[in-house]
């Protein structure tokens, strides 16, 4: 089945009729749950909805009933509830329990095992994977109590979709905004495809170093040369590698996507700073993956003062930055794998192959950045993986960056001589 593009996930869709229980709790973002529901339906899932009483103040159960075609459970003791033991049948006949938006309150209940409403009772009674998309005010999200509860949920095996940063309904700017519905749908589909939730740890023992994001080369105190990389591809690789048991370090340039939890992050803004950080970290790494969009040139000098405009043309002298990937590759010791990316707008495979060859890489991920939904600052990507040991490239369709990351890591596992875990699991 082909999944609609705006679900954020394409490629192998889950079997038609995979059952998702969608828990909606009382945050301003509750209305976005309707978009999540539609995205899941477009991907072929059957969705039933449970709501807290507070959620019903923000969006009517009738909306979800109309969209899902199913009774929406708020109170399982209500006379109109057709199922006398709804908390058991609802919870135990699903393939995924997704809570979006999840308030600080429901997260606290899940973390402590309180079951005083239908959504929290469903959590306790559920043996399917659980995915939680928090949304709340920044101060509440950053409160030590919420941080503790989130860590408890992670330790209990719950998957968390980190909230986005941005302007909140209350006017605060910071993290806490519900992640985009297409990201939530993509994460749900990822779990339904079976890999993430089953915890195959085929990268256990690997120490993976990943560069992510854009570098920023300063011209003067206010101006710089940079690019549109969000860091999402590198972060997806980090998340997937951590999920598969690797110890992960990211050397991050300038990024706009949320950083994945559970990985070490070293910040490095310029190409030279990224070079230094990568060279140091590579000494203790077993695999290097260069997903960052590193500036090839920087201004020959940085003006200490803001450059004044005049009517004359301004010429900037640019000089080459160090090639981090080539340098790391040249410094590698036996047993260290080096994987690069190639962001290309023409002759994609040919140019990528040349980089693979010239930089003596084990593999290169060719990225056609002219394609819709692929490359810079997109949720999805369409890449071709070329390895030094195989004549035929592996061409992948458009899919979420997390899925693409798993496919790339499958190649890392294969190059190591292991079996490719994730794709095999996803069948
Ligand atoms: O961050 P996102 O918004 O998710 O976007 C993802 C991405 C498009 C940035 C990513 O998928 C990608 O293609 N990254 C490589 C971008 C790039 O700079 O490609 P390149 O063809 O110019 O460079 C080839 C390789 O050399 C890359 O691995 C790059 O990290 C590395 N490089 C380049 C220049 C340099 N001075 N040092 C390097 O290490």
Image (cartoon, rainbow, N blue to C red):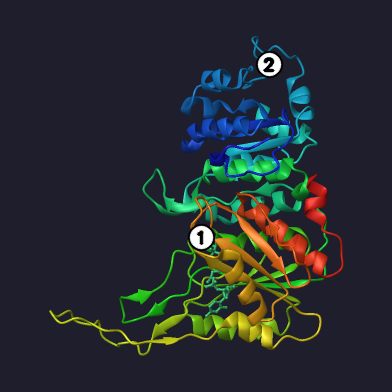
Q: Which residue is mark 2?
A: 77
- SS category of the residue bearing label 1: loop
Residue 369 — which label?
1
**Residue at horizontal 64 percent and vertical 21 percent from the top:** 73
Crowdedness near tag 2: few (<14), some (14–19) or many (≥20) residues, C-alpha within 10 Å: some
Q: Is any part of residue 332 visible from this angle?
A: yes
Q: Position of residue 187 (x, y in %)?
A: 64, 46
The one nearer the camera, 53 or 236, is 236
Q: Is residue 121 above or below residue 228?
A: above
Residue 362 occupies which quadrant of the picture? bottom right
The one nearer the camera, 380 or 144, is 380
Q: Is any part of residue 131 visible from this angle?
A: no
Give left or right: position of 81 versus 373. right
CA distance separating discs 2 and 1? 54 Å
Q: Position of residue 217 (x, y in %)?
A: 41, 79
The mark that comes first in sequence, 2 or 1, is 2
Give left or right: position of 306 versus 373. left
Q: Position of residue 43 (x, y in %)?
A: 64, 34
Q: Count the numbered circles shown.
A: 2
**Residue at horizontal 35 percent and vertical 90 percent from the top:** 301
- SS category of the residue bearing label 2: loop
Determine whether label 2 and label 1 are within 8 Å by CB.
no
């Amino acid at each position: 089945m082909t999944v609609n593009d705006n679900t954020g996930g394409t490629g192998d869709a889950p079997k038609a009729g995979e059952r998702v229980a969608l828990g909606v709790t009382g945050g301003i973002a509750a209305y976005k749950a309707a978009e999540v529901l539609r995205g899941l339906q477009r991907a072929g899932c059957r969705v039933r909805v449970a709501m807290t009483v507070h959620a019903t103040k923000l969006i009517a159960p009738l909306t979800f009933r109309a969209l899902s075609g199913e009774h929406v459970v708020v109170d399982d003791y209500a006379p109109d509830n057709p199922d006398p033991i709804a908390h058991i049948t609802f919870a135990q006949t699903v393939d995924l329990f997704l809570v979006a938006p999840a308030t600080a309150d429901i997260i606290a209940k899940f973390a402590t095992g309180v079951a005083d409403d239908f959504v929290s009772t469903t959590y306790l009674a559920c043996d399917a994977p659980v995915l939680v998309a928090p949304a709340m005010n920044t101060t509440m999200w950053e409160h030590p109590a919420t941080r503790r509860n989130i860590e408890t949920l992670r330790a209990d095996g719950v998957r968390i979709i980190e909230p986005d940063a941005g302007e909140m309904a209350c006017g605060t700017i910071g993290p806490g905004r519900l992640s985009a519905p297409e990201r939530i749908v993509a994460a749900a589909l990822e779990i339904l495809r079976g890999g993430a939730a089953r915890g195959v740890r085929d990268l256990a023992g690997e120490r993976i170093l990943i560069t992510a994001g854009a570098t920023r080369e300063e011209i003067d105190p206010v101006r710089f040369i940079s690019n549109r990389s969000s860091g999402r591809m590198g972060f997806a690789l980090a998340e997937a590698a951590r999920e598969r048991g690797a110890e992960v370090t990211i050397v991050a340039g300038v990024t706009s996507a949320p950083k994945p939890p559970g990985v070490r992050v070293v910040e490095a803004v310029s190409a030279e700073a990224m070079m230094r950080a990568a060279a140091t970290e590579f000494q203790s790494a077993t695999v290097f993956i260069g997903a960052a969009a590193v500036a090839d040139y920087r201004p020959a000098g940085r003006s200490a003062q803001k450059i004044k405009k005049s009517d004359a043309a301004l010429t900037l002298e640019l000089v080459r930055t160090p090639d981090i990937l080539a340098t790391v590759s040249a410094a590698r010791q036996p047993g260290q794998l080096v994987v690069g990316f190639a962001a290309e707008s023409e002759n994609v495979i040919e140019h990528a192959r040349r980089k693979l060859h010239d930089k003596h890489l084990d593999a290169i991920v060719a990225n056609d950045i002219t394609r819709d939904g692929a490359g810079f600052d997109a949720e999805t990507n369409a890449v071709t993986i070329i390895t030094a040991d195989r004549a035929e490239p592996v061409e992948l369709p458009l899919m979420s960056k997390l899925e693409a990351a798993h496919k790339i890591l499958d190649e890392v596992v294969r190059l190591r001589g292991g079996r490719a875990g994730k794709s095999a699991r996803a069948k």
